[in-house]
Amino acid sequence: MPASKSAAARGPAGDTLDTRALNRALLQRQSLLQPSSASPLAMIERLGGLQAQAPNPPYLGLWSRLSEFRPQQLTELMQARQVVRATMMRGTLHLVSARDYLDWRATLQPMLRRLFLQSDQGRAVQGMDLDALGAAGLALLARQCLNATDLGAALQPQWPQRDAAAMARWVRGVEPLVHVPPAGVWDSHRAAGFAPAADWLGQPLSADDASDAIVLRYLAAFGPATVQDIAAWSGLQGVRAIVERLRPRLRTYRDAAGTTLFDPLDAPAPDPDSPAPPRLLADFDNLLLAHADRSRIFDERRKWSVFTRNGIVRATVLIDGFVAGTWSLERTKDTATIAIVPFASLTKPQRAALDELAQRCLSAFAPTLAHAVSFQAA
């Protein structure tokens, strides 16, 4: 794993940051050097949302970053409509605060339409009046919460020659909808039902351009970062113009290749000498998905050990700040087991630290079951 000890300069703008300095900056801002005492809602906003293709990873993502997290806290935030599960950055499901959803969603709308129309799914709705399709879907969902299958069936009488599933995919992928709990809560396996976001939250979406706010939030959570990194995380077009507009509020660095990195003026300077304790990261953790160049956290030679060909991003182990293995939580009727698969041999202190983390995770997420931790060969 990358572990250069060379210090990054801490002087004026334009200093060069090595891989280790970028790694420590990322971990510090993600509360993975020292767990945070922030509330779950504050952490979700600080991170600009949590990747949420599956229900359980956001819970594990908060647990890894917060010192006093209880799973029920996140469930209650979703039930209270303070946090929503919805299609957001990159056209991917995220958990975001209601406030960020209302402020950001309209700005993301052109990107969501573009990504859908560029996808294989977009071909299935070619030639349709997509504005009329979206309006019809929103009207149906305003009357009652429907899952994708029922939504498609309800749309088909208006377009009997079109594929019902494809029409439902357009509405749920592009229109401003939220997944209604229990969809998205811990261990939920029910098909998601959808509701118009403005109805669910009782407020209209902001029409103001939020692109500056989105970019600044990203940099505060994942920077210093390049224009390409910002675009990879957000899916937005025209990122370079946004960054140029924000220049008075940013400082610059360079990475080892000479590429310009941007950072908010008030962001803490990276300290490459900060110790990084072992950590367990969730499946689909944003730490692995927020940069075009992932070398600050991940060795691409290990890509297929973490990123599967069917789109799964495995839960990972951090050692000295870098991805050094994978792990999984498996439960039976009586037992919960965390299996850790390191890429290389662990020292006794590293193994002990991971065992302690795994036991804490089991206590948080499987308190009534017998616990076991195993270490397996890659």
Image (tube, helix red, strand yellow):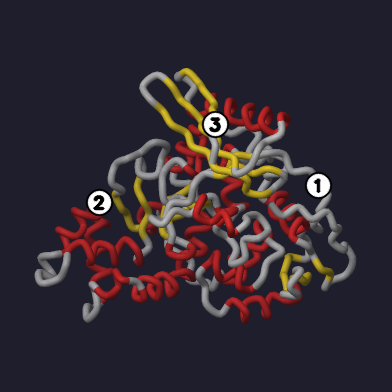
| Mark 2 and mark 3 residues within 8 Å of each other at the beta carbon | no
Q: Position of residue 12 (x, y in %)?
A: 88, 70
Residue 144, placed above or below residue 371? below
> In the figure, residue 217 lies in which quadrant?
bottom right
Q: Earlier in the sequence, mark 2 or mark 1?
A: 2
Tag 3 residue: 70
Label 2, label 3: how many angstroms apart (C-alpha)? 29 Å
> In the figure, residue 375 lies in which quadrant?
top right
Label 1, label 3: how many angstroms apart (C-alpha)? 28 Å
Give me the residue at 65% from left, 54% from top. 297
Q: Secondary structure at mark 3?
A: loop
Residue 244, placed above or below residue 342? below
Callout 3 amino acid? Arg
Which mark is in front, 1 or 3?
Answer: 1
Q: Is residue 302 visible?
A: yes
Q: Residues within 10 Å of mark 3 (few under 14, many from 20)?
A: some
Label 2, label 1: how many angstroms apart (C-alpha)? 47 Å
Residue 274: image tag: 1
Q: Position of residue 255 (x, y in %)?
A: 75, 69
Callout 1 amino acid? Ser
